[in-house]
Image (cartoon, rainbow, N blue to C red):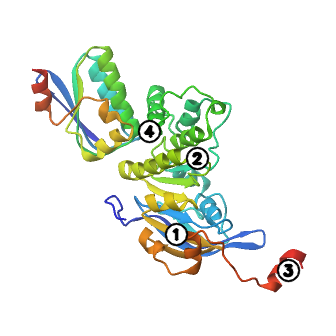
């Protein structure tokens, strides 16, 4: 897994890339929770995720919960088909705020 | 039945597998390849050798001859530490559930994580185990003891434990046994979802025809320790083999009796 972080209109966007599995999900978790701990609004871009396992999804769940507690904005954007099918398995597609793109999320915020 | 996640790469390759129970030969040279992302059903009546076959591909017995490759590793040759590593990629749903009665459902499900993935944060493990409970429709039952669950719920909790590490290879031993038709159909759906979402390679040992026809990519029919055939649902249904047709039509087989062998079995001489 690789990841890239950028700022976009008041959000930090973390782009996850490749396979998010047991070997690297602790790193993804750290990035997500560190960002929220700093009080930043967060979008996680999953467009380049070819595989995500439960530990990766668990990191997203933990992030969303933390964002809610701290009253920060959170969302998943450009979710790849592979990632979406995993979210659907635990019906988490109905739990996370999911957006087609960062732009779409920004429009909703307006 | 074709679907997109079968890659054509073998996940399980069994060659010329011969096994004995004492002096009696049980499997007589079984060869079978199961591809990545495929649901393979192993069917056969009692005594066909299907449970024995499962036991050996799980690495729970040493074959007399032959090789068994799981994810490119020949389990008849690898060291016990390599086997332990391989087991992280294997999930098994046993017939009786096999939950530990002294632990809560949640602790049972987290057990493989504590054992193999201790680098994970405790909260991550909790979320992973709760997600799997949601997947098997047992959300909220984390703090129940196994004794407080029905048979069907125990079975589903056992499936949650088997998939908690997202194994590449998943084995089900008689998943429908003892379940009511609705729960049994739910479990079939779950098996299909695991293949499609998690790209798992799945081996199901069963004698339930309806379930097998619903979920199989291919079916292997075992009989008396031999493979009668391996094929798609259509190929099995259209088979002209008498033994297969007897099984499909639930007819008792009128096997010819070898008088000498029969007498020998009765007298032990």
> Which of the two discs, 1 and 3, labels the residue nearer the N terminus?
1
Q: Quadrant of residue A64?
A: top left
- Can you identify the residue that label 1 sits on? B220
Of the image marks 4 and 1, the number of the one nearer the N terminus: 4
Q: Secondary structure at mark 3?
A: helix
**Tag in front: 1 or 2:** 2
Taking the image as drawn, is residue B114 in sight? no
Question: Contact, CB < 8 Å: mark 4 with mark 1?
Answer: no
User: Mark 4 or 3 closer to N-term?
Assistant: 4
Q: Is residue A73 left or right of residue B150?
A: left
Give the labeled residue for mark 3. B264
Check whether the beta carbons of the residues at disc 2 and disc 3 lie within 8 A of each other.
Answer: no
Of marks 2 and 4, the one in the foreground: 2
Classify mark 2: helix, strand or loop. loop
Q: Earlier in the sequence, mark 1 or mark 2?
A: 2
Q: Chain of mark 2?
A: B
Query: Could you tell me which quadrant the N terminus of chain A lies in?
Result: top left
Within 10 Å of disc 4 (Cα), the crowding (few <14, some 14-19, many 20+) is many
Q: Residue B179 got which mark?
A: 2
Residue drawn at point x = 72 percent, y = 83 percent? B256
Q: Nearer the viewer, residue B179 or B1?
A: B179
Q: Is residue B265 left or right of residue B253?
A: right
CA distance for labels 2 and 3: 40 Å
Q: What separation in Å lies between label 1 and label 3 (alpha carbons)? A: 31 Å
Estimate the spatial distance between the alpha carbons at disc 4 and disc 3, rounded to whole Å: 52 Å
For disc 1, the chain is B
Left or right: B150, with B166 as reference point: right
Q: Are marks 4 and 3 on the same chain?
A: yes
Residue at the spot x=38%, y=65% of the render?
A: B9
Among the 4 quarters of the image, the one containing residue B31: bottom right
Q: Which residue is mark 4?
A: B135
């Amino acid at each position: 897994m690789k990841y890239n972080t950028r700022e976009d209109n008041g959000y930090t966007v973390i782009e996850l890339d490749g396979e998010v599995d047991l070997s690297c999900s602790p790193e993804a978790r750290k990035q997500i929770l560190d960002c929220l701990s700093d009080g930043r609004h967060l979008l996680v871009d999953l467009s380049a995720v070819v595989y995500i396992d439960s530990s990766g999804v668990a990191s997203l769940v933990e992030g969303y919960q933390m964002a809610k507690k701290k009253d920060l904005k959170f969302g998943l954007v450009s979710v790849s088909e592979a990632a979406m099918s995993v979210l659907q398995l635990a019906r988490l597609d109905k739990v996370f705020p999911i957006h087609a793109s960062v732009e779409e999320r920004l429009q909703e915020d307006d | 039945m074709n679907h997109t996640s079968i890659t054509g790469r073998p996940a399980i390759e069994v060659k010329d597998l011969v096994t004995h129970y004492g002096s009696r030969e049980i499997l007589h040279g079984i060869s079978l390849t199961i591809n990545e992302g495929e649901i393979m059903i192993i069917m056969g009546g009692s005594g066909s050798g299907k449970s024995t076959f499962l036991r050996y591909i799980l690495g729970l017995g040493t074959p007399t001859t032959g090789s068994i490759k799981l994810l490119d590793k020949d389990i008849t040759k690898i060291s016990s530490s390599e086997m332990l590593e391989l087991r992280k990629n294997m999930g098994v749903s046993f017939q009786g559930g096999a939950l530990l009665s002294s632990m809560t459902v949640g602790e049972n499900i987290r057990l493989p994580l504590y054992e193999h993935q201790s680098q994970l944060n405790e909260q991550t493990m909790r979320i992973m185990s709760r997600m799997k409970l949601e997947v098997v429709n047992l959300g909220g039952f984390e703090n129940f003891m196994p004794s407080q669950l029905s048979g069907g719920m125990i079975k589903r909790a056992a499936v949650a434990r088997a998939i908690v590490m997202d194994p590449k290879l998943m084995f089900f031993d008689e998943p429908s046994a003892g379940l009511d038709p609705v729960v049994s159909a739910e479990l079939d759906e779950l098996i299909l979802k695991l293949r499609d979402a998690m790209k798992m390679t799945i081996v199901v040992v069963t004698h339930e025809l309806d379930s097998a026809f619903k979920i199989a990519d291919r079916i292997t029919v075992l009989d008396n320790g031999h493979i009668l055939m391996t094929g798609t649902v259509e190929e099995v249904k259209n088979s002209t083999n008498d033994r297969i047709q007897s099984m499909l039509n639930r007819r008792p087989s009128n096997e010819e009796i070898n008088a000498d062998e029969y007498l020998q079995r009765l007298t032990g001489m």
